[in-house]
Each structure stands twice: as structure tokens, then as C-alpha cells.
Amino acid sequence: MHKKQRLYWLVAGFVSIAAGCQPEEVPTQSSTGTQEARLEAAVGSWSVNVPQGDVTGWRAATLLDSGLVMSVRDGSTALYNPYSDSWRTLMGPDPMLFGRTQGSVTRLSSGKVLLAGGRDNATHTLLFDPATESWSYQGQLAEGRAWHTATLLDSGQVLVTGGDYSLRGQRRSAELYEPATGTWSSVQPLPEALSGHAATLLYSGKVLVTGGYNLDSWYHNADPARTAAYLFDPATRAWSPAGHMSRVRRNHVSIRLYSGSVLVAGHARDNSDTSSDVYDPYNDQWLPGPSLPIPGPYVSATMLYSGEVLVLNTSGQGALYDPSANAWRLTASTQVQGYSLAMLLHTGQVLAIGEGAMERFSR
């Protein structure tokens, strides 16, 4: 009798294990209930960190190789240690950093950081050395620019495109920074003058530029926002067309997925637009993406180690994109609001930096 009972429970255990090892059901476009359930369950959590004190207005930030976060504002530099949750302001105010509002900050392959452009001091570029925690002048742009894009290429060079400067309107020009010599060289201009566009490096080494708009010299809308996309090829230093998104976009978010495709979202004709588009570089075509569960404007898109993408809006709401399911999930909301910054830390958490608030997202 006992042998039969043991045999029964042994067989039942095998059946239970077999059932538990079945593959998960893959969501489909028709699985409406499944999709709704995914949206209803908010994921992740936020923890409060020490904010950088007395910082308002423009700021840029980047993650250093050491795991520290460098924050640059108009006139000073500070370092945040995510392991001790503490800030340290470097010697300042630094005259070299004045007038750098809306400049670009790019971490180079060497670990140094390049600061290019700015609203009032837009041609001289600066280089930050983490080893000495100091800035030095590093070459000069041919044209001053702000609100441009800066993209680190596979070669270690940096491509800056478009932007605007003072009351002189938008830029068509593009320039390449060569870290070995600390010099800039001009490349073929963009097909049109752009500001408020996005630039994303592809696995091929090419750079995808999307959207943007063109203002006249008095900052009036001379042309509407763009649907067009362009590709820059470092090998030929030239541009080629890359199709059109489903709608106009400016000041939007753009990020390359693990698959190599590029996800773009936000800032269409109005902030309530929740649409997204996906660029397939292998077939050079645009496909419609799933709508976000939160309204815009969107201020950041950060890829997690899992390949998921965290998008935040100005209200502190978040959404997580799962490329494998081509679907969004709501996340817990953060107290960091407005036009905040976000970056992936070495810990795998996402740090969101705003005025008077700073929090970390854990999946």
C-alpha cells in the first residue's frame, strides 16, 4: 500500500514538473486580455537619493568609467557617487564652463568627456580628464551650435550634427572630432537644417538622424517638424535618405534595441501623442510600434541590461518596453519631474536626476 502511494506521488510530481516546464504563452496582437493585464501591473520601484543641491536650469550628465556620475552645469562640475549616495563639487566656478547651456557632453572611448557647443560660448570645445578632475581646451568647432546632437562613433570619433546658434537659425553643418589630435573637421552637411532632432548609432556604424524642425532667424516655425530620417556613413562621410516615420517628431526619444532596430517615440504634433515607430535597419523600413501607456512629453529612454527600455515623461510617469513581446508595461512613478536626465548605472539601476529630486529605479 505504501509502495503504491509513493508511486502515485512520484508520478504526480513528474506531471507537475512537466506542466511547470511548459513554455510561456507568447503574447499576440489578438491577446487583448493579456496585453491589458500587462499594462495594469506596474513594475519596478524607486528609491530616494540625495539630490544635487541648488541646481536649476540646464544641466548635462554622463556616467564615467569609474561608475561615478559627472554632472555639468553652466559654470561648474560635480561628481555623484552612487555607492555612497553622495555629491562632491569640483573646484569652481570654472570660467571655461560659462556659456555652455545646451551644449553636448560625450564620454569618449578613453574615458575622458568631451563638451561641445553651447548657447553663448559655442565654438571652443573642452575635454574633462577624470584622472585629474580638470577641464582643458580641446580644439574648436567651425560653427557655433547648441541643441545639436553628438554621437560617439565606433572609430572613437564624435559626430555633431545640426543645432542652432543665437539668432542665426538652424545648422545644416556636421563636424567630426578626432580624439587622437584634438581637432575637428567638416563633413557633408545634413540634407536640411535641423534642430530638436535625434541621432542614434546603428550596429553597422552608421548614424540614424530622425525628425527635428527648422526655425527662422527669429525662432518662428519656418517649417513644421519632420518625418524624414537620414543615415550618415562614416566611411564616405556622406548622408543618404532613410525613409519616413509615421508622423512628424521633434525633441523625441530614440534608442537602439538589442536587435539593432531603433525605437522612437513622442513629441509629434502635440504632447498627448503616445505613438512610437520602429526603424528596421536591415530592410531600411519604418514599422508602427505599440502606443505608450503614458502621455508625453517623454524626456528619456534608457535601456536596461535585460534589453527592456524605460521611458519617463515630464510628470514622473514611467513605461517599460519589452521588445520580445512588443508591448509596454506601466512602472512605478518617480518624484523626479520636469525635463530630467536618466542613465543606467553599473548596478543595473536607472538614475533619474531632476531639480531638487533624484531617485533610482530598480526592476
Image (spheres, rainbow, N blue to C red):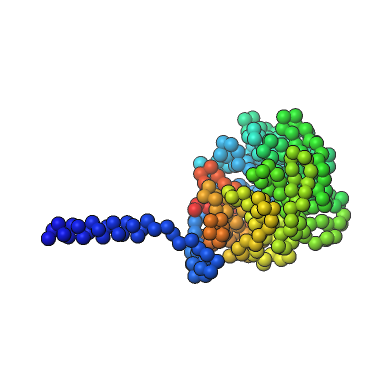
At horizontal 71% and vertical 56% (from top left) the residue drawn is: 251
Residue 181 vs 276, above or below: the answer is above
Q: Position of residue 12 (x, y in %)?
A: 26, 60
Q: Position of residue 150 (x, y in %)?
A: 72, 44
Rendered image quadrant of residue 137: top right
The answer to whether residue 345 is left or right of residue 268 is left
Q: Position of residue 356 (x, y in %)?
A: 61, 53
Nearer to me, 162 or 203: 203
Residue 302 vs 19, above or below: the answer is above
The answer to whether residue 72 is left or right of residue 319 is right
Rendered image quadrant of residue 196: bottom right
At horizontal 17% and vertical 60% (from top left) the residue drawn is: 5
- Residue 356 appears in the rendering: no
At horizontal 59% and vertical 50% (from top left) the residue drawn is: 259
Q: Position of residue 272 (x, y in %)?
A: 67, 67
Nearer to me, 254 or 88: 254
- Residue 160 appears in the rendering: yes
Nearer to me, 203 or 68: 203
At horizontal 69% and vertical 64% (from top left) the residue drawn is: 271
Q: How many marks?
A: 0
Residue at the far front in the pictured view: 283
Q: Quadrant of the N terminus?
A: bottom left
Nearer to me, 21 or 328: 21
The answer to whether residue 229 is left or right of residue 318 is right
